[in-house]
Every structure is written in C-alpha cells, then in structure tokens.
Image (cartoon, helix red, strand yellow):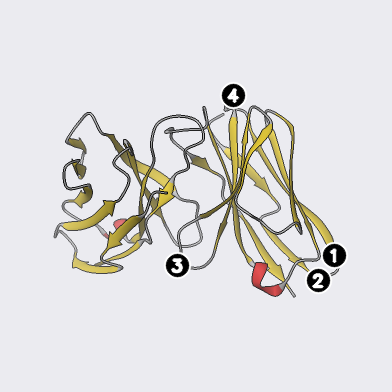
C-alpha cells in the first residue's frame, strides 16, 4: 500500500516569512495529492491539491509542487500570517474506486509575530 | 448546501453504554467515510461507504458498527467501547470513492469513561 512521509513535524516561522512542508510517497500509481489544513479543534479543510499531470499549482499565497520522478511534493506558503498557524496534512492516492487516501503524519506550523 | 453535518458535537459515555454518531450531507455525494483522529495525529480511516454499500472496513473492532440508511446519512453505532476509543470521530464525503476531494464534518468528540 501507499506510504506518505511528511517533514518537518513542527515548523516555526516569523510572520511574513515563507514556509515549506515536504512529503514523499511510495506508490508510483498515486496521482492525486491534496493538502489539508486543520486548525485547533476544527475540521480538516482542503487548501490546495494537485494531480500528476501538472508540476505546480498556485492559489494566492499557497503553492504546491510535484516531482513524480522523485515521488515528492511540497507545500509552499509565502508571506505567512498568524492565521496560517495550524496542522497541515499532505495526502496521496491513486485514481479509481477502492483506493484510499493516505495521509502524512502532519506538520504543526506556528507563525510568530 | 456544501457542508457535512455531524451530531452530537460532544459525547461522553460509559463502557456499557450504547450510543450513535450521526452524519448528514446534501451535496449528492455517493461516498461517505468515517475517520478516527487522535490528538496531533492524521485522520485514520475506519469505514467507507460507496453508493450506500460498505466498501472498506479497516479491520475496525465490532464495537463500532456503521450504517448507511440512504445516500445522505451515515451513522456509527457505538457499544461497549474502551477508554482508548476516546477520540475525534470525523465523517467525510466525496462525489465518488477515489481520487476526489473529501469534505469533512466538524467531528464528534467522544470521551469513554
């Protein structure tokens, strides 16, 4: 089955700095890679996702890059703000029924003033 | 309606009690999921229903019993739970089971005494 590793487990940045979270996956059949943000006591919410037919996707201050050859993908947050503080989970799955979403272990991001 | 609604938000039960968690969505999604989440850990898949049929049971103990009465509702019946079952139980849905965006509910915080 799929295995997703995520680093770092904790990340502390100053407000305005950039933050990068990295994930690697094991199953070359995986082709869908979402990122979820979970604030304390709240539900996980999708913030961005990427499919294997593209290498990069941006949405305002958030971007995700995918390297299929190396089997890794990364989340980039620019101009971080205090409200970006949360736990971020990467995930991976292969298209098609019967394929489960495998989550990474999570990164606790803290944006300090 | 773009939400997944879960009730109750909080539940405290003894080890001999029987209770149920409920989940509802009206987005026309045909896949519904139960996840268990411990503090600072990723969501852990328990069950998947696809078109109201149980597609995946991740070897969950029989003290957890899922039910999908119709395409909009998902229940999780709880009986003879253990203190280690205390966790946040998240319901999610997606248009189809596969590489689709998961929409999570806010969760039911369960405490087993």
Horizontal relation, residue A78 to residue B85: left or right = left
10 Å crowding of disc 1: few (<14), some (14-19), many (20+): few
10 Å crowding of disc 4: few (<14), some (14-19), many (20+): some
Separation of disc 2 and disc 4 at Cα?
A: 35 Å
Tell me the element at label 2. loop
Q: Which residue is mark 2?
A: B14
10 Å crowding of disc 2: few (<14), some (14-19), many (20+): some
| Position of residue A15 measured from the top left corner of the image (x, y, whole percent) | 19, 63
Give me the residue at 71% from left, 53% from top. Answer: B8
Chain under callout 3: B
Q: Which residue is mark 3?
A: B40
Asked whether residue A112 is in view, the answer is no
Chain under callout 1: B
Q: Which residue is mark 1?
A: B17
Q: Which residue is mark 4?
A: B28
Separation of disc 3 and disc 2 at Cα?
A: 25 Å
């Amino acid at each position: 089955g799929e295995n997703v590793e995520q680093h770092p487990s904790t990340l502390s940045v100053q407000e305005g700095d950039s933050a990068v979270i990295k994930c690697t996956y094991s199953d070359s059949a995986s082709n869908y890679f979402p990122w979820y943000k979970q604030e304390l006591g709240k539900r996980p919410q999708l913030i961005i996702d990427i499919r294997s037919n593209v290498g990069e996707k941006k949405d305002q201050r958030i971007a995700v890059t995918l390297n299929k050859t190396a089997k890794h993908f990364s989340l980039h947050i620019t101009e971080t703000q205090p409200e970006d503080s949360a736990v971020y989970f990467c995930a991976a799955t292969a298209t098609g029924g019967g394929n489960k979403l495998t989550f990474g272990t999570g990164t606790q991001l803290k944006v300090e003033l | 309606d773009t939400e997944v609604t879960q009730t109750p938000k909080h539940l405290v039960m003894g080890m001999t009690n029987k209770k149920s968690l409920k989940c509802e969505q009206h987005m026309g999604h045909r896949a519904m999921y139960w996840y268990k989440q411990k503090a600072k850990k990723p969501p852990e898949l328990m069950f998947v229903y696809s078109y109201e049929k149980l597609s995946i049971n991740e070897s969950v103990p029989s003290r957890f019993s899922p039910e999908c009465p119709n395409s909009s509702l998902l229940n999780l019946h709880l009986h003879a739970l253990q203190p280690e079952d205390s966790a946040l139980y998240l319901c999610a849905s997606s248009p189809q089971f596969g590489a689709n965006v998961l929409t999570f509910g806010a969760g039911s915080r369960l405490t087993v005494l």
